[in-house]
Every structure is written in C-alpha cells, then in structure tokens.
Image: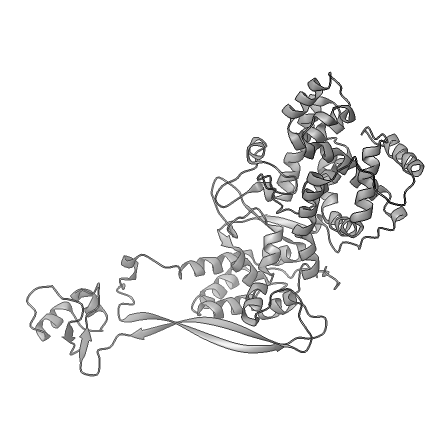
Amino acid sequence: MNKILVTTSLFLSLFCFGQETAEKESLLTLPKMSYLDSLKTTFVNHSTSNCIDERWLSELANFELSNDMYNDIETIDIDAEVSYNLSTEVLKKRLAKMDAKSPFNIEYNQALENTIKAFLKNRPKAFERLMAVSEYYFPMFEEHLAKYNIPMELKYLAIVESALNPRAKSRVGASGLWQFMYPTGKQYNLEVNSYVDERYDPLKATEAACQYLSSLYGIFGDWSLVLASYNAGPGNVSKAIRRSGGSQNYWNIRKNLPRETANYVPAFLATFYIYEYRKEHNIMPKKAPLTYFETDTIMVKKQMSFKQISELLDIPEEQLEFLNPIYKLKVIPFLDDKAHYLRLPKNKMGLFVSNEEKIYAYLEYLDTYKEKTKTDFIPTTKDSAYVEAPKVERKTQFHTIKSGESLGKIADKYDVSIAELKKWNHIKGNNIQAGKKLKIYSDKKVIVQTEAKASKDGTYTVRSGDSLYSIAKKFPGVSAEDIKKWNDISGDNIQPGMKLKING
C-alpha cells in the first residue's frame, strides 16, 4: 500500500487583502474552468496528493464485513458445538484473566465457547481486516468512552453493530456505526432531514451512543444487560428479567430474549476475546495508515457540493463521501441558525483554511451560472447590445497506465472523478492494468459575448418572448420607434416568426 500521509510543509503567509481583491477581480473575468485553473495556481500549499489510498478507503467503507456480521448474529446457532483447535481449559483460563480486569461479567459457558470457535474458524481474515479499520476509529471511541466513564471494552460494540461501517444500515432502518433507529437518534439530538442524517456522523453518533449507554447503565447497573438492552430495547430486557423470575444475570435470562439479542452478547464477548488473543490465534492485522484524529473539521460559510470541493482541493468525491457521510445529497447546506461542518484530511484542511476567501469567491462566481428565471435574461442597459452564447468545448486525451497507479491517483491527476474514469472507459471494478490506455475528457464552458446583428438581408426574425423594446436594445443606436418606422408598424404587437427590417 502506498504511503498515505504526506507531511505538510509550513504554510506560507496569506496575501494581503488588497492583493487578494485584485486577484479575484481579474479571475472573475475568465470563463468558469479557466477561473478554476487560474485560481488553484494561486493557492497557498497547493497539493494534488491522494489523501486516503483508494484500497484503504474501500476497506473503510466495506459493506461485506457489516453484512456478514448481521448474518452471523441473526443466524448463528451458538448452542451447536464447533470443531476448532482450542482446548476448553485454555479458554477458561483466558476468560478468567479477561474477567479479572474487566467490569463485564465474563464467565465460561458452552455457548460462549461455541461462538468464539465459530468466529475463529470461519472469520479469521475478516477479523484481520476489522482490526486494521478499528485503528482508524478506536482512538476517537476511547476518548468519548473515557469522557462518560464507560468501560473501554464497549468500543467493540461498534464492531458487532456495524463492523465499523459508518454507512451501515440494517433491514429495519438502524443506521451508522452505532446503528441508531430514527426515534432513538432524535432522542439524542441526531438530526435527520432532507439534507442531513447525523446518525451517519461518526463523531456525533459516538457521543450519542455514550449518552445512551450511560442512561441504560443507570437503569440496569450491569454492562451485559446494557448490551442486551442496546440491541433489543430496555423494555424487552425488562420483560425477559420478569419471565426469568427476576434474575439479573444475562445468561439466565438469555432464553427469554429475542433470538438476535440472545446471540448478541456472546458475539460481543467473542469479539473482545479475539482482539485480546489475536497473536495466539495467528491473526495479524495490517497497520492502519491513519486515524480519525488525522482528519479535522471546518464550519462552512456557504452551501457547497462535494463536486465543487473535489475540484477545488483535488480530493476525490469518494473520499469526501466517506469523511462526510451525513450529507445525503452530497451537498453541505448553509443555514444561519445551524452550523454544518466539512471534514477533511489534515493536509487538505490546511489547504482549505489557507485559501478560504478565494474558495468562497469561486463559489459565489459559480452562482452566476445557475439557471435563472426567464425575466432575469432581459438585457440591462450596460450589456444590452450583447447576447450570452454558452459554448462547451470537449477535449479528449489518453493516459497510459503506469505500474503502481490506481484509478484514484489518475483521477486526481486529471481533476476528474473515479466514477467518470470508469464510465468513459467501461471499467466495472477497480482493477487496472499497466500499459493500457485510458480515455479522459475535459469539458470547458466558454461564455462568448457576441453582438446581435441582423441577418444578411437586413432582417431580424422575432423570437418567442421578444418585444420591440428588447429587440431594439440588441442593436446599438436603434430604438423601438425606429423599428416601427422601418416596418410600418403602428402598435406594439409583434408575433414570433415575423421578419423585421433593421437598418441600424
């Protein structure tokens, strides 16, 4: 795996306000793409490096792991014995050591042994992958767990819930790393609307999960029962306790819990065990190239899309989607009464902060190209003699793939998205072969200001929406009365398709 983190150099000091204003004024006169290219050449600490390796990004957002975890918890028969080379006596000693240093009640029983053996036998590679991904999230989890005085072991809960996929969604609608249902998320201030679903925000969801776990512990006073109630709801756990004669031991009430919850705590403890004794079972995870703390956030001051951010900062849209999973439409909204944040790798955050004023100036410039209502196209006195004629120029070039290159690296080089590369070259997966050529397009929108002229025979054909006044304004020195005189028109009525003599 290519080295991901790029050591950022010290930022140069920003241009003074006067210089920056002059730059904006000169750049605003250029066509859209030219403006973007010119703008980026002025960026302080301008970097085109890949922030998160494509393969690592794919692993962080892998749905296979979360789907397999859901399936295991729902279908595994933890009362069925499993053939695996781990003696019961060794397991008992290890569980006793775990119990001695944990606030959880970790006692040996056959169901737990079966679950541990099943995971070790069927999913060793999956756990190697999970352990690498957990290095990205665990430091952040541990900080929040410590804040609420919650056992550190509860970081493994997110593995059982979502296999550490921030976009995981269960068949019943539970979402995010901590699998919040909509009502519970709202209860803990996780906003859900057309633009945003904060259940997918790792930081906010972790904070909410800690609050919820603390609340559940206040009800049950036992961490195993807290886990069960996190999965099934405190009402179902209370019913199971009553049906079990008032027992407060999870293993005694397990038979009265829903099937998924009956498997849930054993899956959690099995995960805990495998992390503790991974070396003894030859599970060797790769080192994670970065952690969640190597990203940072900034409050946005204007609505912006992932595509715009991608173009400005040379970061693939796929990385923005992963780092900012709460934005459902790939757009960060701006509201006066509600702050919204953009999360970026720290080197890209430095680039954004150092050039913030230029970035917002560019976004304002893009607003001038939004489609306007019909009345907005009436020419003003200043530019009445001109007509905007948008023209798109498409350039085609070819890139020969070099050994070690990825789609993400190539996309960054040409300022396009990975999805576009795949579409243009009919690529289905992520594998590419050195020596092959990739077709790459670039579109430039050029706004051509052309003076309106009469046709060769000295006439102008009336279009829908035209008036004598608007037509006259298209021709320097021509008035509506001139057009009336030249065409023997007494009133103001004209019809589309009419040909008017223009002598100006």
The x, y position of residue 112, in whole percent, is 81, 35
206 with respect to 443 (left or right):
right
Is 232 rendered above or below residue 376?
above
The x, y position of residue 260, in whole percent, is 68, 35
Q: Choose between 51 and 113: the one closer to the eye.
A: 113
234 with respect to 341 (left or right):
right
The mark tally for this picture is 0
Q: Residue at x 63, y 35 (%)?
A: 208
The x, y position of residue 19, in whole percent, is 52, 64
Question: Residue 110: which quarter of the image?
Answer: top right
324 with respect to 382 (left or right):
right
Is 158 rendered above or below residue 130?
above
Question: Residue 478: which quarter of the image?
Answer: bottom left
303 with respect to 429 (left or right):
left
Residue 354 visible: no
Q: Residue at x 74, y 47 (%)?
A: 134
Q: Quadrant of the N terminus?
A: bottom right
Q: Residue at x 88, y 48 (%)?
A: 281
Is 217 rendered above or below residue 88?
above
Is 77 rendered above or below residue 236?
below
Q: Quadrant of the C terminus?
A: bottom left
Q: Residue furthest front?
A: 80
Q: Residue at x 21, y 83 (%)?
A: 456
